Image (cartoon, grey):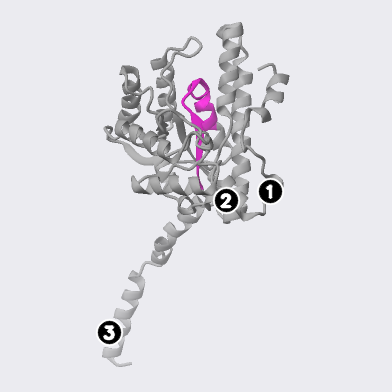
Amino acid sequence: MKPAQLIILFLLAIFLGCKNPTSEKVEKAPEKSEKAIQSKPVVSFTFDDGNTSNLAGFQFKKWNRMILSHLEKEDLKAVFFITGKNKLNTKGQYLLKSWNDDGHTIANHSFSHPNFNSEKNTAQVFENELIKTDMIISKFSNHTKLFRFPYLKEGQHQAKVDSIRNILSKHNYLNGYVTIDASDWYVDQRLIRKIKEVGLDAIDIDTFKDFYVQHILERASYYEKLSYEMNGRHINHTLLLHHNLTSALFLGDLIKEFKEQGWDVIDADKAFQDEIFKSIPKSNFAGESLIYSMAKQSGKYDHVLRYPAEDSRYEKEEMDKLDL
């Protein structure tokens, strides 16, 4: 073999030896990670109303801070849909500032919490309610133009729904949809009533906690199953909870149980970026949770849908049996 050929073979061997055989695998790693994220159900936390009262012996500032502490411990950010009526005084402004300063998003839940399925609450009433609370929340750095309907009622007929949707669009608002609904508010009512009856020291707080957590997880599983059947994927869910005593006492346990049952828990503002929230149901199917409306509109799930979707009537018998 000629000397020139030997030199070429020598240089080629050096080049091949220096090539990193794992470089292609490294480039594909993020793709695998993305698939892993989509393989689990996902939930985020949103809160409604904004109570400024002392509750069953718990001072307002204390129980409000308990909710925020649960979220801080888990490094989670929520969206807080507030009613404006009780936010103009010192306590109301303190509440909004406490959530805003902790990095949570402040959104619109009307001014006086009217039911827009009622004839008396017209589209004009809706616009007034929207604007009055917008003026309150717009002063806070973390406010956003999301509106959540009180009672999840968007209007009792198609024409009214369309009028309200036009008003939302006019004011650059989007619907702050719920995808997982439940009756935490009813458990809270029963808890406060029981504390007033027997006192905090005598109450079976663990049984209340267990019922609350089991109830929320059961409803979450229901809406996740329904959503997965319709969408063929795990969407980013927005769970509706209320700013109340059950959230103050049991939110940490609820988050822990979600994680133990295999759910990913994410920030609510990230959850609202899911494409599912662009799936606006037709006007004659508006109301309740987004997943409920989509299922109703499809016409395929009437055998598993109930109306109202969530209500105290569904939990009363079991809570009575447990003496809660």
Say what secondary structure mark 1 lies in: helix
On whether residue 255 falls in the magenta region, the answer is yes
Question: In the image, what residue type sits under mark 2?
Answer: Met
Question: In the image, what residue type sits under mark 3?
Answer: Ile
Distance in Å between CA atoms under marks 2 and 3:
71 Å
Q: Is residue 79 above or below residue 160?
A: above
Whether residue 107 appears in this view of the structure is no
Magenta range is 236-256
Residue 107 located left or right of residue 229: left
Q: Residue at x 35, y 71 (%)?
A: 17
The residue at which mark 1 appears reads as 302
Say what secondary structure mark 2 lies in: helix
Q: Which mark is residue 294?
A: 2
* Contact (Cβ within 8 Å) of mark 1 with mark 2: no
The residue at which mark 3 appears reads as 7
Q: Is residue 26 above or below residue 171?
A: below
Whichever of labels 3 and 1 marks the residue nearer the N terminus, that label is 3
Q: Local crowd at mark 3 within 10 Å, few (<14), some, or many (≥20)?
A: few
Residue 215 located left or right of residue 245: right
Q: Local crowd at mark 2 within 10 Å, few (<14), some, or many (≥20)?
A: many
